Image: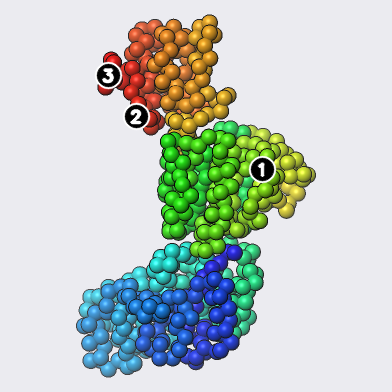
Amino acid sequence: MRYNVLACDYDETLAKGGEVAEETIKALERLSRAGFKLLLVTGRQLDDLLSVFPHPALFDLIVAENGGLLYDPRQRTCDALAAPPPAELADRLREQGVHPLGVGQVLIATREPHDVQVLAAIRELGLELQVIYNKGAVMVLPPGVNKASGMTAVLDRLSLSRHGVVAVGDGENDHAFLAAAECGAAVANALPALKDACDLSLDEPDGHGVGQLAGRLLAGDLDAMEIPRHHVLLGHADGEEVRLPTYGMGLLVAGPSGSGKSTVTTALLERLVGDGYQCVIVDPEGDYAEHPGVTVLGDPDRVPGMEEVLHVLEQPDHSVVVNLIGQQLRDRPAYFAELLPRLTGLRAKLGHPHWLVLDEAHHLMPAEVRDVPLRHPGDLGALLMITVHPDALSPDALRLVTSTIAVGKEPRNTLAAFATARGRDVPSLPASPEGEQAGDIALWHDADGHARRLVLAPARAERTRHRRKYAAGTMAKDKSFYFTGPEDRLRLRARNLHTFVELADGVDDDTWLHHLRRCDCSAWIRESLGDAELAEEVAAVESEADGLEPRESRRRVADLISERYTLPAEPTAFDPDHQDR
């Protein structure tokens, strides 16, 4: 389910002539019984609304005074969302005979043509206030207060996200909250400008249109509706933007190690999190421990608990990295199998998270896993899986893929591996043009027989990749460093930088100098870690191998590593505070 909230304007949207038809009430009751949250967002003052509308408890919360007031009809509590109106302004308007004149807890209201007097009084008194119009009504409010700000306050109180909201209205003052919702709808009697700006124009007027909208929500008809203004930017092709839907997508990012999968993922995550989509990143290797804008749970010594993850995710503005670097590879599929239904349950309850991102997806859903308890990516909003080996993924996970991004020098091979694993024909891909950029990727939508090349739109802030993984995680065998010594007597595997420093401290001087003279250390850092800057610094120490004491060269290499990577706080023989030094 994509939506879980319906937010309605009152006059000439829910009501006609101030009254709400019984059939409209019944349509909203059905929606409420189905688990939808109902919000009323009106420009009316609260007392005025309650005098004409006898069913306020039908709504979970009510925003009155055009975003200035929050009313709980069940608890009968009322909270002002901004400062009260300046008394001197109301007094000035009364003295000038402005009528009608309504003074609420936050709002001052009248009608045209008295807006001329209102604007003059605001200017003469030197007040910082805004004037909002709606079909002849004139509303004076503090800056930044409108129906969108009021709806945001309601959503915050209910721990809901605007990306689960359908909002419906008819007039000028509805523009803001329709734009703030995931889907903005206009009843048939709405102003033409509002219809032009909204995502969905209804066939019926006022309450009949709201009833039509409620029926479509119950049927799930709106879930698959494309809303291009929410699509996330991926890159550019032929001078045009290429964007991806933010709901219902099963996206696979695949390619060889070091080919740019993390670059693609980081760019997408930056834009999704920046637009308020809640993302859950399951991170088996510690690659996202320093990703901006997210809360990291877990570390090399602790696997995050399920309740801990769910507690943080209850707040829609908190995206989460579930760091599994401290968990054995063999235990990760079981952990994920337990986490997945908990996430779908949370989304069914609150309408978020919006994206589930699975790095090293073949660690979480390997080919041996026969059943993945997810019917459709939409059950989690959208799904993004990253892997080196598409053919190593569970067939049940592969069926969730709707689009594939291939990165690296041979995207055809990556697409072919995925297509073969799915039992599909390999898509055609145009030849790489001359001057192909490093950011070039290939995109294949499942329904198409061909893929297209495009240039990735990079993230604004480049992330330091794999820092925690390289510091304390478990690197693959072909990426690890091996201390062998001059006669290949040893085979001591350094699975990460921490064990590299520890083993360098423990091996004999001949073994250490053997690798230093051959420049093995800088080559490993450059090729396996992809850290050219650190490699150059270590190479400078290697160039002095015969002019330094082994202890000194060990210390200098260890210091260079610790300056760039966070290593566990354990002393080595060349630490200044080491007890045995």
- SS for dot 2: loop
- Name the spot of residue 504 as percent of width and height, x first: 42, 16
- SS for dot 1: loop
Residue carrying label 1: 369
- Name the spot of residue 159 as percent of width and height, x first: 43, 64
Q: Nearer the viewer, residue 294 or 525?
A: 294
Residue carrying label 3: 579
- Name the spot of residue 406 as percent of width and height, x first: 64, 41
Q: Is residue 459 visible?
A: no
Residue 569 - label: 2
Q: Residues within 10 Å of mark 1 (few under 14, many from 20)?
A: some
Residue 265, quarter of picture = top right
Quarter in which the N terminus is drawn:
bottom right
Q: Residues within 10 Å of mark 2 (few under 14, many from 20)?
A: few
Rounded to the nearest angstrom, the CA distance separating label 1 from label 3 is: 49 Å
Name the N-terminal-most of marks 1 and 3: 1
Rounded to the nearest angstrom, the CA distance separating label 2 from label 3 is: 14 Å
Q: Residue at x 50, y 63 (%)?
A: 350
Vertical order, 410 against 224 (above or below): above
Residue 46, quarter of picture = bottom left
Q: How is the image coloured?
A: rainbow
- SS for dot 3: loop
